[in-house]
Amino acid sequence: MPTHDLYANDPGDSLWQVPATGAARFNWEYDAGRDRLLALYQKGKDKQWDGQKRIDWDLEVDPYDPLGTPEESMALYGTPYWDRMTDRDKGELRRHYASWQFSQFLHGEQGAMICAARIVESVPDLDAKFYSATQTMDEARHAEIYGRFLHEKVGLVYPINDNLQALLGDTLRDSRWDMPYLGMQVLIEGLALAAFGMIRDTTTKPLPRQILAYVMQDEARHVAFGRMALRDYYKQLTDAELREREEFVIEGCYLMRDRLRGEEVLENFGIPKAEAAELSEHSEFLQLFRKLLFSRIVPCVKDIGLWGERLQRAYVDMGVFELGDASLDLLMAQDEETAEQLDAERFAAEERERVAEVREAVDAGAAED
């Protein structure tokens, strides 16, 4: 079924064109490179995987409870709207929220794929071009997987959120080669990693947990790549140039914070836009969710050298300043370990099933004798 037929709201023109600016940069020095980036490139090659095979797509998903979402996480919970809803209505609400979340993941992954390809084109260093080429493939796989989950398991898709689209457009239209790194690797990828992790660690459903764990294993490398490249480059910039990047981060963070309201879902349930915004803003669960989503961005921004006074004040205003002291390396290591542990658990269970099948066949043969 065409995706257009699954959209909850009219997405408009199916093709969004962003005018490209800046230069394509070639580098004729093929031998030199930074050891850390080349090691990350090798890891990117070694860790390629097939989303058709690694993920168990035969797992059943209830489209009216795709994630095992607790009632308390619904923005309408505890309101008169919730009290009037039937069980079927609540299931439909869970379906729409899951679709909205995973649709933004899907659109963000396509944006990441395009930004990674832009980095291949515009970054001056060949080692960074090499790694970005592996990331482009990673992001294509992620978009494929999220698209399949929405098409086959949920049967509902939401258009890209206005604020996410605005940040993507700003990132891609900027002619400076480091801006796709900053907009995508740090802001959008950092936010996505935190969102993936929160759902991965709370969902009771095995298929979305597999999807998120395996995607996060890739994304941990992508954020590491952005940190390495930008930390080196930003040491060379003037104070004025650093302030320009900090202004971009501030604006982007406010856009991303405001992206996370999910007002489109509530509007589809007949709630006026202003009231939908109010309900989403004051939901205790969503307030905590929005704060924790900056757990990857704030320490990364600080690590790459963007930590001016105005940026710090903005993070105080958002209530996320203290996240700057979080250990990004520890979080990334945990993302890697979670995926490896999930693989080990799945393969151990499959091995036990195979052993049991062999024993049954042997026992059946012995009984016939």
Image (spheres, rainbow, N blue to C red):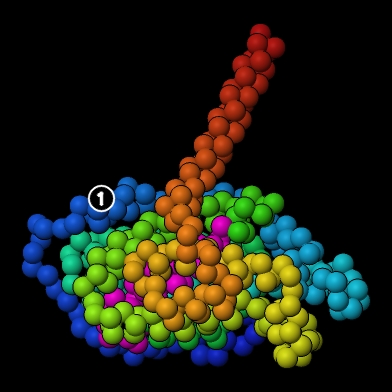
Number of numbered discs: 1
x 68%, y 82%: residue? 263
Seen as rendered, the residue at the extreme top is 369
Residue projecting furthest to the right: 84
Against 38, is 88 above or below?
Answer: below
- Res. 225 image quadrant: bottom left
Q: Position of residue 156 (x, y in %)?
A: 65, 73
Q: Is residue 88 left or right of residue 142?
A: right
Image quadrant assignment for residue 41: bottom left
In the displayed orientation, state which residue is furthest to the front. 309
Q: Looking at the picture, how far across and down is residue 308, in whole percent?
A: 39, 76
The residue under the point 80% across, 64% down is 71
Q: Which residues are magenta?
A: 172-197
Q: Is residue 205 left or right of residue 317?
A: right
Give the residue type at disc 1. Ala
Does residue 316 appear in the picture of this structure? yes
Kindly identify which residue carries mark 1: 39
Instruction: Using the rendered view, name the quadrant where residue 132 is placed.
Output: bottom left
Q: Residues within 10 Å of mark 1 (few under 14, many from 20)?
A: few
Helix or strand or loop: what does disc 1 sit on? helix
In which quadrant of the rendered image does the C terminus lie?
top right
Return the residue nearer the eye: 129 or 220. Answer: 220
In the rendered image, residue 226, in percent from the top left (x then y), is placed at 34, 65
* Residue 265 appears left or right of 357: right
Determine if the magenta segment contains residue 143. Answer: no
- Dividing the image into 4 quarters, which one contains the N terminus? bottom right
- Residue 214 at x, y percent in the picture: 49, 52
Q: Is residue 180 magenta?
A: yes
- Write the residue at 74% across / 70% down: 284
Residue shown at the point (69%, 51%) measured from the top left: 204
Compared with residue 144, is residue 316 higher up or lower down, i.e. above or below? below
